[in-house]
Amino acid sequence: MTTPKVMIRCLQPDEWRLLKTLRLRALACDPESYWETVDEASARDDLYWNTCASRVTTPQGSRMFIVEHAEIVAAFVFGVKKDHDEYSVGGLWVDPAHRRKGFGSLLAQQVVTWARADSPAAVIRLWCHTGSALAFYRRNGFQSLDRFRTHDLDGRRIVEMEWRGTRWPSGSNPPRKRADRAPKNPRDPAKSPD
Ligand SMILES: CC(C)(COP(=O)(O)OP(=O)(O)OC[C@H]1O[C@@H](n2cnc3c(N)ncnc32)[C@H](O)[C@@H]1OP(=O)(O)O)[C@@H](O)C(=O)NCCC(=O)NCCS
């Protein structure tokens, strides 16, 4: 018996339909984990999804990393490049059939590696629902910044976290830029995904 191959790759420019399918699947499967609802996302037109795909496939821009297991998508994440050495992890989702196999950690670390290769001064943050994913992110080197947002409609809370996996080269803390800024539009998966 052969072990199925696990591959990690980036979304390609012509794959906007795949981005849409995966995002809708994640929102439908784990609605409590994301700020955006599946109804909101389903109502978006093709131009929106095309634009998202462009944002994560332009050279030097943001990225969508995909884990394929036996050539089927098992997990994905957005690595979002903002201004001034700021990066974020967004929209992370692992297919329930593949959870607790390390795929989520693989993708979280992939974003960290990618951001730090892009800028040695990278500050990597994310917004996490205050549920079980907190333990997951802590284990992956993220710490809470104790900054919270509460959903207007259902009262769900998300907390901002920052990657502190290793010391910065100089031994000092990484630069903190616009630390108090909440995501401009947490509903756009290619801009500031949750
Ligand atoms: C959170 C999520 C991404 C984790 O992915 P995963 O591939 O299962 O994670 P890993 O296998 O890399 O987990 C590594 C460790 O994280 C922690 N962890 C992962 N899921 C956990 C959970 N549900 N509860 C508590 N700890 C958890 C554990 O310490 C785990 O190690 P262990 O299996 O030895 O106990 C996945 O469960 C998921 O997609 N959840 C729904 C969507 C979501 O919450 N996304 C994050 C948005 S903020």
Image (cartoon, helix red, strand yellow):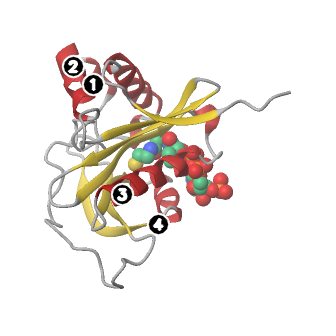
Q: Are marks 1 and 3 in contact (CB under 8 Å)?
A: no
Residue 99 in the image, given as x and y percentages of width and height:
61, 41
Looking at the image, the residue that sits furthest to the right is 1
Q: Which residue is mark 1?
A: 41
* Mark number, residue 44: 2
Residue 48 in the image, given as x and y percentages of width and height:
19, 22
Say which of 166 and 58 sits in front.
Answer: 58
Q: Quadrant of residue 118?
A: bottom left
Cα gap from disc 2 to disc 4, whole angstroms = 34 Å
Q: Which residue is mark 4?
A: 141
Q: Are marks 1 and 2 in contact (CB under 8 Å)?
A: yes
Q: Could you tell me which quadrant the C terminus lies in?
A: top left
Identified at 21% across, 61% down, the residue is: 85
Q: Quadrant of residue 71?
A: top right
Crowding at dot 1, Cα within 10 Å, few <14 / some 14-19 / many 20+, comes out as some
First in residue order: circle 3 vs circle 2: 2
First in residue order: circle 4 vs circle 3: 3
Crowding at dot 3, Cα within 10 Å, few <14 / some 14-19 / many 20+, comes out as few
